């Protein structure tokens, strides 16, 4: 393997990143709507998890290329 990714893999990574960012926005919105402190904390924590996932390199390319 040369270390280059295919166009299909790049598209999959972009889609995955978009999905992570959508989840961040949703969990942040849910946290804003929560009146229960415990639930608000859990929603904020989930937003943080997906925010972190959107910042690190993904291992998702393997399933995109069919080699997983």
Image (cartoon, rainbow, N blue to C red):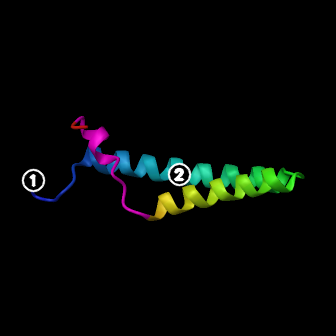
Q: Which residue is mark 2?
A: 20
- Chain-order first, disc 2 or disc 1: 1
* Residue at (77, 54) in percent of width and height: 31
Q: Secondary structure at mark 2?
A: helix
* Residue at (66, 54) in percent of width and height: 25
* Residue at (44, 46) in percent of width and height: 15
Instruction: Examine the structure image and report whether residue 13 is included in the region drawn in magenta.
Output: no
Structural distance between the alpha carbons of marks 2 and 1: 28 Å
Looking at the image, which is closer to me, 26 or 47?
A: 47
Q: Which residue is mark 1?
A: 1
Residue 32 placement (x, y as % from top left): 81, 56
Residue 10 placement (x, y as % from top left): 31, 51
Residue 30 placement (x, y as % from top left): 76, 49
Residue 16 horizontal side relative to residue 10, left or right: right
Range of the magenta residues?
A: 56-66
Looking at the image, which is closer to me, 53 or 7?
A: 53
Instruction: Examine the structure image and report whether residue 60 is included in the region drawn in magenta.
Output: yes
């Amino acid at each position: 393997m040369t270390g280059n990714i295919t166009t299909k893999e790049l598209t999959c990574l972009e889609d995955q990143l978009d999905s992570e960012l959508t989840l961040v926005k949703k969990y942040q919105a849910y946290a804003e709507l929560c009146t229960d402190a415990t639930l608000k904390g859990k929603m904020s924590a989930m937003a943080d998890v997906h925010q972190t996932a959107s910042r690190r390199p993904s291992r998702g390319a393997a399933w995109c290329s069919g080699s997983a």
